[in-house]
Image (cartoon, helix red, strand yellow):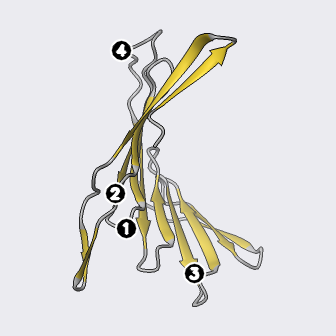
Amino acid sequence: MLTTLIQLNGSSPIATNNFYYTNAATLSTSGAATNFAFGLLWRSVRPGGATNDLAFDGRGFVTRQIRYPATAEAPAISDPPITNYFSYNARGQLYQQQTAGGGTMQSDFDPMGRIKSKEAFDQYLESIVAQASGDSERRSAKL
């Protein structure tokens, strides 16, 4: 597995990315079987120190992504990390995403696994529903 990527300008290194992999993911038991996910990329460190961390379920699907904004020029940057969460149904389809800004995207699938609709909620519970037919509808909820 790739653990270091060095970009060169001629024979001089100009940037280095580092990659770290899991030995095993968090266990997920479904019925009588316990699933393990090995060798998944859990951290990448880009030039300047900005870092991405990933967490996985037992099937190897990304459940959490954290992006740390630190750089070599500003190692103590005051911006908070950006965290996104992902949820999958029993068929392995991404049915919900939660963003750091408080938004949520939910998907619905037909029996053949095709996307039937997507609904995006912002932190104020306003949503837009996009149907597979191309139609869309705006909904709002009062708090």
Which residue is nearer to you in this view: 21 or 143? 21
Determine the CA span between mark 3 and mark 2: 29 Å
Q: Residue at x 69, y 11 (%)?
A: 10
10 Å crowding of disc 3: few (<14), some (14-19), many (20+): some
Q: Which mark is residue 107?
A: none
Image x and y of residue 92, in percent: 46, 73
* Residue mark closest to the camera, 3 vs 2: 2
8 lies left or right of 135 = left
Q: Secondary structure at mark 3?
A: strand
Q: Amino acid at mark 4?
A: Ala
Sequence-earlier tag: 3 or 1: 1
Q: Which mark is residue 109?
A: 3
Sequence-earlier tag: 4 or 1: 1
- Return the residue at label 2: 38
73 lies left or right of 28 = right
Image x and y of residue 18, in percent: 44, 29
Q: Residue at x 43, y 76 (%)?
A: 89
Sequence-earlier tag: 3 or 4: 4
134 lies left or right of 28 = right
Return the residue found at the far right. 134
- Look at the numbered discs 3 and 2 and tell me whether their residues touch, using CB distance below 8 Å: no
Image x and y of residue 119, in percent: 57, 68
Determine the CA span between mark 3 and mark 1: 20 Å
Determine the CA span between mark 1 and mark 2: 10 Å
- Look at the numbered discs 1 and 2 and tell me whether their residues touch, using CB distance below 8 Å: no
* Residue mark closest to the camera, 1 vs 2: 2
